[in-house]
Image: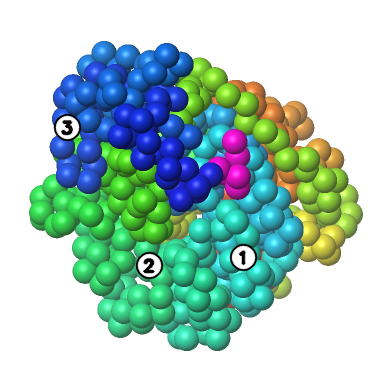
Amino acid sequence: MDHAHFPSWPDVAPRLIAVAAGREAADTVIRGGVWINVHSREALPDHSIAIAEGRIAFVGPDASHCIGPDTEIIEADGRYMIPGLCDAHMHIESGMLTPAEFARAVIPHGTTSMFTDPHEIANVLGLEGVRMMHDEALLQPVNIFTQMPSCAPSAPGLETTGFEITPEDVAEAMTWPGIIGLGEMMNFPGVSNADPKMLAEIAATQRAGKTVGGHYASPDLGPAFAAYVAGGPADDHEGTCEADAIARVRQGMRSMMRLGSAWYDVASQITAVTEKGLDPRNFILCTDDCHSGTLVNDGHMNRVVRHAIACGCDPLIALQMATINTATHFGLEREIGSIAPGRRADIILSSDLTELPIELVMARGRVVAENGEIRVDCPHFDWPDAARNTVHLGHLLTGKDFEIPAPQGANRVRANVIGVVENQAPTKALKAELPVIGGLVEAEGETCQIALVERHRATGGVTNAFVSGFGYQGKMAMASTVAHDSHHMIVVGTCREQMALAANRLAEVGGGVTIFRDDEELALVELPIAGLMSDSPATQVAAKAQKMVEAMQACGCRLNNAYMQHSLLALVVIPELRISDLGLVDVRTFEKIDLLEPLA
């Protein structure tokens, strides 16, 4: 039964009461396990769980009074009975998968609830794209709650998106059945400066009684941060150090600590709990962004919980941060996040509380995965042609589109350069002295070219700049239509002709990621839906993504998960320097800056 039509607690309360009292038989009983009680933070051996109508009716040492001739018995055999894991903040599109295929990938890892912000597709297809994601999410056998995107564009005036989200859009979405709140409020200067549009979106969410997601990507914890919190965002996942985590919980926010494919922000913040001894109930674990390779090979929220434990966190506290803390934050404590009467029967069986092998997964009272194999169908939405034809370049690109003219008479110039930082979202604002050859500025050494190619309105626009840190060598280029958050096309390369080849190739296939070297395509990941997602299985997408990683390495890149760094180079809300269709943006001041400066 899908999310939209899952019966409410009041609908089934008479049956739950009857089963708990022993007057009726349970549908299923899980017998003889260790009850991980996240309400009391206890591990209670020799307990059983009785389930009816997809919900938990009874938990106790003996559930024999709930068993009838048709009751299915699952023997826990002394294993831990753990609430299904919740991902508090994530973007399905980052997995390069549709909601159905993302669900299929993560269910075997024990994730039974996700709080997703589809702001990637909102930038490409607007409110209609959000509705498509929402509708497919509701079809799934696990709980996928949708946050209405708040910031498209993420920084008004500094980028042009395919569509803009308005306060009216937000108010409409708050009436949809699967909407749980407002997605991350990335325009933190807008909130701190009381921008009427941002405050209208927050107000529409609060009036609907739903949760406002935060995104405060600044190290400034002074009045600007206080002003942001006063504006209404209730959580934040952009913290990178212990001081960030402490500041957020002291101000009444939930500190969301993320471990994604490229974000390693748990170890640096969880010391607020493990060393400083802060109350852990306001700390939450999430992934934010996980690509398909991570999901297939390493896991999802189970990976995050294992990591938190490895960082010194008590396993029961780590599990609270991935279950009940999340449910409470979103007002769903009576629905999900724990093993207790009335809650959805989302349960994991695991033989080890530290390594957390996911041996059986139950969602809404039925077994959905066992020993890494999915046991249910994940239905697909019928994605229309409008969602599959979204790359519009205006003309066939050539090497000339990527030329950077030098000031007349100059033989060397100083350029502002985007500096990539391994495993982190922020970049560095660097400067490099570059040569001029034939009137054109040429990249050299660690510096290569970056371009943002407009792809929503076929303007033919190309913004050129420089980036450092990838380590590319030879004549190569990498292009991607995943370009947070405006999702134009980012092309990085050492050769203008290869950059043109890569960009044209993505227009040909309707979006994705490609790498060219010496006129040969080394890797291609087709993402035909909005240029962001594939409706192919995660294993197939992951295999192509792995070839992409190998191709990046073959071209000289040595960074961990550098694709995530590539795809974020246009994210004009995270310091220090980014590229947009309007130019080079200094995110420390939220102003456009010149690419070239005169040499002193």
Q: Amino acid at mark 1?
A: Thr
Q: Residue at x 76, y 32 (%)?
A: 519
CA neighbours of label 3 inside 10 A, class few (<14), some (14 to 19), many (20+): some
Q: Nearer the viewer, residue 438 or 338?
A: 338
Look at mark 2 in the image and give the residue it sits on: 234
Dots 3, 1 in contact, CB < 8 A? no
**Which element is circle 2 on?**
loop
Nearer to us of marks 2 and 1 is 1
Query: At which x and y percent is residue 564?
Result: 52, 44
Look at mark 1 in the image and give the residue it sits on: 175
Determine if the magenta segment contains residue 174.
no
Between the C-alphas of marks 3 and 1, the distance is: 39 Å
Q: Nearer the viewer, residue 502 or 443?
A: 502
Q: Amino acid at mark 3?
A: Ala
Question: Which image quadrant is residue 313 in?
Answer: top left
Dots 2, 1 in contact, CB < 8 A? no
**Which element is circle 3 on?**
strand
Ranked by sequence position, the earlier of labels 2 and 1 is: 1
Look at mark 3 in the image and give the residue it sits on: 43
Ranked by sequence position, the earlier of labels 3 and 1 is: 3
Please say if 35 is above or below 328: above
Query: At which x and y percent is residue 541?
Result: 63, 29
Dots 3, 2 in contact, CB < 8 A? no
Q: Is residue 364 left or right of residue 476?
A: left
Q: Nearer the viewer, residue 328 or 46?
A: 46
Q: Residue at x 75, y 28 (%)?
A: 520
Q: Quadrant of the N terminus?
A: top right
Which portion, as a residue range, is magenta? 1-6
Query: At which x and y percent is residue 198?
Result: 54, 78
Please say if 371 is above or below 529: above
Q: Is residue 423 left or right of residue 119?
A: left
User: What mark, if any, has residue 492 been given in the picture?
Assistant: none
